[in-house]
Image (tube, coloured by chain):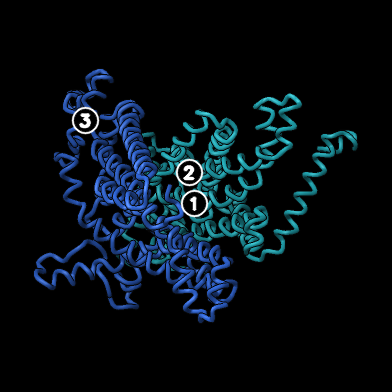
Chain colours: A cyan, B blue
Amino acid sequence: MSATTPADSPRALAWRRRRQALVDVWRAYRTTPAGLVGLAGLVLFVLVALTSPLLVTADDLSVIRAPYEPYQPPAAAYPLGTDNFGRSLLDLVIWGSRISLTVGFLATLVSVALGSLVGIVAGHFRGWAGVVLMRVTDWFLVLPTLVLAVALAAVLDRSTFTIVLAIGVTAWPTTARLVRAQTLAVEARPYIERARALGGGHVHVMVRHVLPNVMPLVLAQTTLLVASAIIAESTLAFLGLGDPTTVSWGAILQDARRAGAVSSGVWWYLLPPGLAIALVAMAFTLCGRALEVVLNPRLRERR
Amino acid sequence: MAQATTEKAAPQRVKRGDPGPMLRLVATRLAGAAVSLIAVMLTAFFLFRVLPGDPVRAMTQGRPVSVEQLAELRRQYGLDKPLHQQFLDYCAGLARFDLGTSYQYRLPVTELIADRLWPTLLLVGTGTLLAAALGLWLGTRAAWRRGRVTDQVTTGIALTLWSVPTFWLGLVLIVVFAGGAGGVLPQLFPTGGMSTPGVTGTAAILDTAHHLVLPVTTMVAVLYAQYLMVMRSSLLDEMGSDYLMTARAKGLRDALVLRRHAVPNALLPTVTLIFLNLGQVVAGAILVEAVFSWPGLGQLFYQGLRLPDLPLVQGMFIFFSASVILMNLLADLVYPLLDPRVRP
């Protein structure tokens, strides 16, 4: 982007500095083995989700024209066994990754956007507005998240959008607290005073000065949030609150329980979706923790 | 509960001098909790009466119901009245501790909650105690040997268990230990419920304990990771302190330095977290209870959701939120007693 503007303009300078910071972060990140493992897992799952329409056809997922015999243990044609209708579990898990990852990302986006907005505003306006916002945040933080998400999902229509909303609306307070703390730290620095003295308004300070400085920590927090959002999605789907027509990892587990896979010991129906959830959640957690260490100097010293 | 703490907290401060700041702290906290409770009540009203559009239609979805039946239900739940009248009725009901009548059981919600409270308390209490003990012990070990294999293995296992969805872990445990893993293992534990019908006396206690093993294992597996991580990091914070260096310089053995000096100080944040979590854990028991058919509050909530029985779900939402708020209040008030550093 910066290539189009003259090299000496302040904007180009800022972009060059940002690119350099990115390179530095990547250099530090590269040295954390756990972070690299997490990143590799993450890339793998995203690739699988993106290519799933090529790997799985509508017929593979059809309940009526299921390709195989029901309840078959793993074999060459269906490496993870088949479900109660005779669909290959590998196909189901691959297809389920689409909804699980999408919901995970979208819900995180909603909650991070909401959390950053509330956090920056609460940190910037330190009068009664900030106090009220933080009271609301604390109140949301105290509410039992699962109960609130479940209640929201129960009263709204059963759809993927509802699930995204239920998770997003309940997961933002931690981000808001984090962002507020960081905002306070940034606003205490002299260059903010300089910006104000030069006539920078509230919006200018918040968007041009505070936001870029808060983003790195938010990024680490985002990665950690995706993990819990994916687990939350599977939980809501398992409680029967998801869209009944879509295949997600939680929905597969709910189907398995309904079909009696637990009491009849059909372990291959239960293991793959659960392991997929755990692996994705772990990949995101590893990435998030590695990023946190790289981006937060306090943690880097202590490690 | 909060009242008792208030009375206990004040006299102790009197001995030390001016009671003003402590009383003010207690008053602020009580007022804060009261505001939170009122906000919960408003949210519940909005969530279950306004948001669904037509609560009765939501409750009867998927079943053939005549127009007359719908009207009758509406009349029964007072939904035919204007919204502000509904709100006043709702507030009046709450003031009398009346959470409404369940659509599914035709019983007062408060009665249903009281019936199911004890099993949940048993499950959550046992689970929290074990998780706290395990988390504190392993967290201490991990911090003391930080960076070594012990540390890496314990934190690794904890993070893995933390990434696993609760309900799935429960299902797997049922398949392996209650279903006999497809005939490979003997059937070690019951698949669900709280007791075997017909067992009485001392045998009944053992029987309940037997039923408790798998649900508690699931709860502990999910809970302890958090306690471990907090204990580990708070002990790591303490380990840089000068007073530990002094203790070592005096010639104390490492084990004694850890036990007498570092751990008591590091315990405080972890204990707060455990208290703060108590309320959340009660709500978190929903999944464990649903999976193991444990006859507690969580299962009641789960059954309420399936219909959905909105009066029941609403009543339990208020109950769960109120219990979290009260637990937080308790933690806030007990913390200054434990830690002199945060006293006003």
Q: Are marks 2 and 3 on the same chain?
A: no
Instruction: Choose top left, top right, bottom left or bottom right for residue A166.
Output: top left
Tell which of B39 and B176 is nearer to you: B39
Q: Which mark is residue A171?
A: 2
Tell which of A126 and B274 is nearer to you: A126
Q: Chain of mark 2?
A: A
Percent from the top left, x then y, of residue A63?
41, 50
Q: Amino acid at mark 3?
A: Val
Percent from the top left, x then y, of residue B19?
35, 45
Q: Amino acid at mark 2?
A: Ala
Task: From the image, tell me which residue sits under label 1.
Answer: A228
Percent from the top left, x then y, of residue B326?
31, 45
Q: Secondary structure at mark 1?
A: helix
Task: From the image, tell me which residue sits under label 3.
Answer: B65
Instruction: Choose top left, top right, bottom left or bottom right for residue B249.
Output: bottom right
Q: Residues within 10 Å of mark 2 (few under 14, many from 20)?
A: many
Q: Residues within 10 Å of mark 1 (few under 14, many from 20)?
A: many
Number of marks in picture: 3
Q: Secondary structure at mark 3?
A: loop
A140 vs A98, left or right, is: left
Q: Are marks 1 and 2 in contact (CB under 8 Å)?
A: yes
- The residue that appears at 21% across and 36% down in the rendered structure is B99
Q: What is the CA distance from the residue labelled 2 to the residue labelled 3?
A: 37 Å
